[in-house]
Image (tube, rainbow, N blue to C red):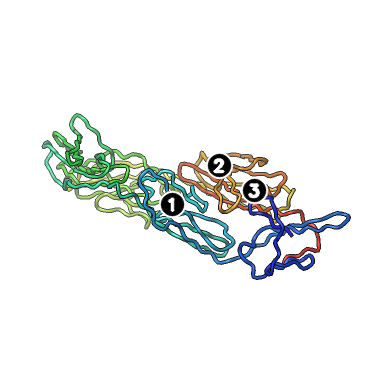
Amino acid sequence: WYKFLEGSNKKQAVILDDRIKQVSGTLIIREAKVEDSGKYLCVVNNSVGGESVETVLTVTAPLNAIVEPTIQTVDFGRPATLTCNYEGNPVKTISWLKDGKRLNSHDGRVLRIDSVRKEDKGMYQCFVRNEQESSQGSAELKLGGRFEPPHIKEYFNDNTMQPGVSLHLKCIASGNPTPEINWELDSKRLSSTERLRIGQHITMAGEVVSYLNISSVHTNDGGHYKCVAVSKVGTAEHTAHLNVYGLPFIRPMDKKNIVSGENLFVTCPVAGYPLESISWERDNRQLPINRKQKVFPNGTLIIENVERSSDQATYTCVARNAQGHTAKGNLEVQVMVPPRIVPFNFDEPIYSGQSAQITCLVSEGDTPLNISWWFRKSDNSELIPLPNGITVNKMGTKLSMLFIESTSSYFAGSYACIVENRAGTSKYTSTLNVHGKMILTPCKLA
């Protein structure tokens, strides 16, 4: 009896001892362990010739996963490594989540970050799964203490004013490294104009002082003003509302692209004061018209779980004052559909020398689509390009077929189809198990 080394065609003779014995053609393994799992080869020889047969033994054990180190502090720009150590068998998939969201770019037991950035800090989870159960481990990644995220120390308050007077807003922020301060009006970046001046300077204490001045305010200067302090290790912001007396006014709204299944959140960029109401309409019908839609008095519109068929449309914000004057502004909402892959699997069983194929069909998703195939030899390895000897044919824009003319253990492993478009990424994986040619022999595995 021989046992193949994991992930290779090399084999070595099974070492017999008190636990593993051979009686005639039968291999007996007492008190089986997970490490006994693998592919075995029985070889029978006589003076005329020889025959052989392969068989696969899988020893199951409960899954348990931990991520190490459990807490890691890394300086900005330095590398970080998280390792998912697990026990149990079999392990079908390994996946990672960060702050509860799937990391599609990582699916091996080791997660590497070449250069840690501010958005990398947080909680990481590793999930190991098979067809019967799953287990998870978690760890926290922190940024090193030599950096100080931005902090806004001085800011401005809500204000109501007459048109024609001067406006002066100021923000003071600290941090290491020294942050830069940007200004926004109703979530749109502001820059200096003939009437509006933005500037900043750094004090002897290393604080940044930024100001926004308007020489003579107009009614349409009203809205939500925000100062945003940004550095490579974090962000801090402050928002306050400015009311300027005058007739209702709505600033132009950019087209809103949103992924199907997400929630739409938009606030009408309205000016003018005082206002009696701010409402939203669609096709001349005032919202909400269903339970997914929520409209708030400040002009915020929320649509939950957006769908292209029901929610892609042009929405109109309407601002009114007590004298009956109105202003209207249109918002075009386009719903983008991420790719969805129809599940696929290799036929079973597949023996060495037989052909094998799988088809990756995208049932829905906006074009253009990028469809690619990747390979992984074992659960512990990373995805790599396909081995030589595999043919991939693309048919149309939503279908790709992978074909292996003559299989062998060289091609055994997991094959992943990854589909990307501007709305998102989808991946589906199928495992190819290649068995030796089935030959009837007196060998048995007990």
Name which residue type carries label 3. Answer: Ile
Query: Which residue sits furthest front?
Result: 17
Does residue 364 appear to the left or right of 326 in the view shown? right
Q: Secondary structure at mark 2?
A: strand
Does residue 417 appear to the left or right of 22 in the view shown? left
Binning the other alpha carbons within 10 Å of mark 2 as few (below 14), some (14 to 19) or many (20 upward) gives many
Task: Tell me residue 92's x, y (percent).
Answer: 57, 57
Image quarter in which the C terminus is found: bottom right
Name which residue type carries label 1. Answer: Gly
Task: Tell me residue 255's x, y (percent).
Answer: 36, 40
Viewer-nearest of labels 3 and 1? 3
The answer for how far apart the CA atoms under marks 2 and 1 are is 22 Å
The answer for how far apart the CA atoms under marks 2 and 3 are is 14 Å
Mark 3–mark 1 CB contact (< 8 Å): no
Query: Which residue sits furthest right?
Result: 48
Viewer-nearest of labels 2 and 1? 2
Quick one: 206 or 335, which is closer to the camera? 206
Residue under label 1, please give it.
Answer: 261
Image quarter in which the N terminus is found: bottom right
In primary-sequence order, the first of circles 2 and 1 is 1
Quick one: 190 or 74, which is closer to the camera? 74
The answer for how far apart the CA atoms under marks 3 and 1 are is 29 Å
Q: Which mark is residue 371?
A: 2
Residue under label 3, please give it.
Answer: 358
At 46% from the left edge and 58% from the top edge, which residue is drawn? 67
